[in-house]
């Protein structure tokens, strides 16, 4: 196992929604703030100096296709889609929100980054909506109603393994 590194505090809240559509390709967009950190202009939409609508432009420029949802923070945007090769499998792709350049989600020991807490809450709801819907249209009518999501202790792994 890699050495455990210090982790920033984490508390997320909803910061708006939108819909990205290009022809038949439709993604629900969730804007998310991480609050209570140093450099709030990096993590909070109202302080970052970038309009939320720029994410829709970035998605268009990136040529995003399929059906799914997007979770966008001022510093990172992740696109989750239901796989065209196996629609019961969710794909995820990361981008820098600032310029929509691709982010490598590869992490140590051969793992891939899936989601932070807010993304996981939204993904759980969205996957449930997908599984229960009888059609794409029915799926698209539903939105996650997630709420404030603080991680109470961001150093418990380090404490457990004695890395502090």
Image: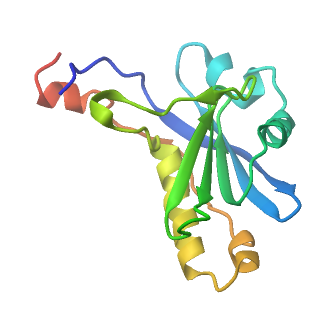
Q: In the figure, 148 relative to 99: above or below?
A: below
Q: What residue sits 74% from the left and 48% below the top?
A: 64
7 or 78, nearer to the observer: 78
Looking at the picture, how far across and down is residue 107, in whole percent? 38, 30
Q: Quadrant of the N terminus?
A: top left
Q: What residue sits 81% from the left and 55% below the top?
A: 19
Q: Taking 128 as reference, is 45 left or right?
A: right
Q: In the figure, 33 relative to 147: above or below?
A: above
- The way the protein has been coloured in the rendering is rainbow
Q: Taking 122 as reference, is 2 left or right?
A: left
9 or 116, nearer to the observer: 116
Looking at the picture, how far across and down is residue 7, in whole percent? 36, 22
Looking at the picture, how far across and down is residue 36, in whole percent? 53, 24
Q: In the figure, 37 relative to 91: above or below?
A: above
Outermost residue, front side: 85
Outermost residue, right side: 23
Q: Quadrant of the C terminus?
A: top left
The quadrant where residue 26 appears: bottom right
Number of numbered labels in the structure image: 0
Q: What residue sits 72% from the left and 79% below the top?
A: 138
Q: In the figure, 89 relative to 122: above or below?
A: below
The quadrant where residue 159 appears: top left
Q: What residue sits 49% from the left and 64% below the top?
A: 89
Looking at the picture, how far across and down is residue 134, in whole percent? 65, 86
């Amino acid at each position: 196992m890699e050495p455990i590194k210090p982790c920033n505090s984490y508390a997320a809240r909803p910061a708006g929604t939108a819909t990205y559509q290009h022809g038949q390709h439709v993604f629900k967009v969730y804007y998310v703030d991480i609050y209570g950190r140093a450099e709030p202009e990096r993590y909070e939409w109202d302080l970052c100096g970038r309009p939320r609508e720029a994410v829709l432009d970035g998605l268009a420029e990136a040529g995003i296709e399929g059906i799914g949802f997007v979770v966008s923070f001022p510093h990172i945007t992740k696109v989750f889609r239901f796989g065209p090769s196996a629609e019961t499998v969710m794909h995820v792709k990361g981008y820098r929100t600032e310029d929509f350049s691709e982010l490598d989600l590869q992490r140590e020991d051969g793992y891939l980054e899936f989601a932070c807490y807010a993304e996981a809450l939204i993904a759980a709801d969205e996957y449930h909506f997908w599984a229960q819907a009888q059609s794409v249209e029915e799926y698209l009518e539903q939105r996650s109603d997630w709420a404030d999501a603080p991680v109470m202790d961001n150093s418990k792994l380090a404490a457990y393994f004695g890395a502090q």
